[in-house]
Amino acid sequence: MRRKHKRLSSDADLDITAFMNLMIVLVPVLLINMVFAHTSILDLNFPEESAGSNNPDKPLQLQVMILDEQLVVSDNQGGVIKQIPMTNGTVHDYETLGLVMKDIKARVPDKKDVTIMPRPDTSYQMLVSVMDTVRSYKAVVAGSVVDAELFPEISIADAPEIIPAGEGEGS
């Protein structure tokens, strides 16, 4: 005959001390790392339809064209404001671009938008550098260096194709 034996069962206590210690350390570390992983985003707009017209009744539209050999600052009313050639023939002159934009801002202080017109082969770094230059500049206020606003509302459009002189007139 077989006897049925009752097995003695005991409830095991769960020791979660090690897990709690891990959470106490892990949560602050993850929260601190969130600050360092912050990504900066710029709002970009589509250019207005009147960006290419020469009608003086239309509001002023500033344009910065990024070409291979130069940066061209222009508007829709007077045409080209300044052509900025490359420095040393290799690097665009962002410092001069910043000075031109400061001068324009001094003449038109209420203007906040600008259209940047890169060529299709313009590098991303060059585009970002131009955007940073026209958006703000470093200024000293009360002994502190701050970013002073120039033209924070940036629109992106394609640069027009430039036809070299002499090729467009039936040659």
Image (tube, rainbow, N blue to C red):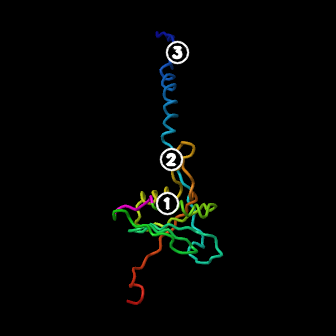
Q: CA distance from mark 2 to mark 1?
A: 28 Å
Q: CA distance from mark 3 to mark 2?
A: 45 Å
Residue extending farthest to the bottom is 170
Observer-nearest of 66 and 89: 89
Q: CA distance from mark 1 to mark 3?
A: 72 Å
SS class, disc 2: loop
Q: Which residues are magenta?
A: 90-95
All told, the count of numbered labels is: 3
Q: Is residue 114 left or right of residue 162?
A: right
Which residue has dot 2 on it?
39
Q: Residues within 10 Å of mark 2 (few under 14, many from 20)?
A: few
Which residue has dot 3 on it?
13
Q: Is residue 106 left or right of residue 170?
A: right
Task: Tell which circle, 2 or 1, labels the residue nearer the N-terminal end.
Answer: 2
- Is 93 above or below relative to 22? below
Q: Residues within 10 Å of mark 1 (few under 14, many from 20)?
A: some
